[in-house]
Image (cartoon, grey):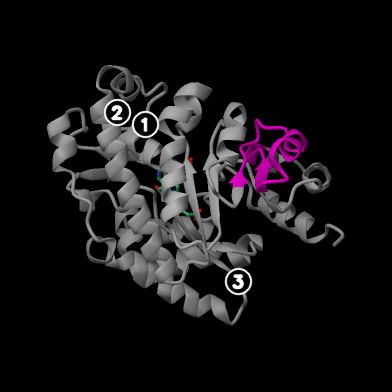
Amino acid sequence: MRQAGRYLPDYRRVREQVSFLELCRDVDRAVEVSLQPIDAIGSEAVIFFSDIFTPIPGMGVDVDFRPGPVVAAPIRSAAQVERLRVPDPRESVPFVFEILRALRGELAAREIPLLGFAGAPFTLASYLVEGAGSRHFGTWKRMLWREPATARALLDRLTDLTVGYLGAQIEAGAQAVQIFDTWAGMLSPADYREWVLPTHREIAAKLDRSAPLILYVNDGAHVLEETAKSGADVISLDWRVDLADAARRVGSRVSLQGNLDPCALAADAATIAQKVRELARDAAPARGWIANLGHGCLPDTPVEGVRAFTDAVRGLAP
Ligand code: CP3
């Protein structure tokens, strides 16, 4: 859940020297930044440093970061969708796989697992159509109703991209992969079933499942049963979901991940430890549980708070 980043002083030192885009493409620096959380916060898995928008320029789309993704010419027409390429990621973003291979080499001896990730089709489309982050993503949501065939064609291309991209990550050494659907939670349950669930199911069906698949749907309490039908092994929950309730509803079919509010890391260590014990108690009925946050660390998250979280997780009785 965005464990490397601006809340870490060591990350900010590296970022002073290069832009975010350069950092994603600079193999040595990206490896360095990916490894920082192991010592800085005591994390027990590493997610390679990149962004969900990394494979998008390879489709022929001009992207910048300010600080979130900004698209020079938003995708609004059937002709633009038609022109989007679905490249072989090994050719369009070779540095991603160099980063993963280098990390696997570094981590093998330490027995720390390596995670790959990708943006989910719906969330990638949200930015591609809107052009940037937005409160309501009105342009994208209107496209679902006014030009459903264009919206479907866009999601189909992005689903193909994601299947190829995650497959190549697994091939390069990722031992589990996570898909981030940050904006899918803005749909009604019926619209989610129509527009989002099929994309997740297709990805789950086509990937090499020797690497577990983790699915994060932000703000997705109302579609929890649907996320559990995606075929993913683990459902990563945001903090708005009651973990005990989620464990009862879907915990026999999937494992759960999450879901402390990252803002709770501003509390003192004893409070954070208490929250971690409550999460462990609530998750107990589920098939499995990965202790984690409910969303990424914000830039002003205190490092001591994140450290208190991982210390408390290690302190849980086996
Ligand atoms: O955890 C890690 O270390 C992996 C790296 C990672 C980043 N982004 C690095 C990043 C991951 C897994 C992401 C995922 C991502 N990116 C998502 C899905 C998860 C979520 O947070 O909901 C989304 C929607 C994006 C798109 C994106 N990238 C946004 C909206 C922003 C700006 C928001 C912000 O936090 O300011 C980014 C930029 C970004 N991606 C940063 C980092 C460390 C900050 C860039 C900087 O250093 O200037």
Regarding residue 131, the answer to whether it shows in the image is: no
**Amino acid on which disc 2 is placed:** Glu
Q: Describe the element under mark 2 as helix, strand or loop.
A: helix
Residue range (magenta): 235-263
**Is there CB contact under 8 Å for labels 1 and 2?**
yes
Q: Quadrant of residue 17?
A: bottom left
Q: In this orientation, which residue lies closer to the viewer: 270 or 101?
A: 101
* Pointer 2 residue Cβ closer than 8 Å to ligand 1: no
Q: In which quarter of the image is the C terminus?
A: bottom right
Residue at point 21%, 32% (across, down): 74
Q: Say whether residue 289 is left or right of residue 190.
A: right
Mark 3 closeness class: few <14, some 14–19, many ≥20 residues within 10 Å:
some
Q: Is residue 8 above or below residue 221?
A: below
Residue 212 magenta-highlighted: no
* Pointer 1 residue Cβ closer than 8 Å to ligand 1: yes
**Is there CB contact under 8 Å for labels 1 and 3?**
no
Mark 2 closeness class: few <14, some 14–19, many ≥20 residues within 10 Å:
many
Q: Describe the element under mark 1 as helix, strand or loop.
A: loop
| Residue that label 3 marks | 112
| Residue that label 1 marks | 133
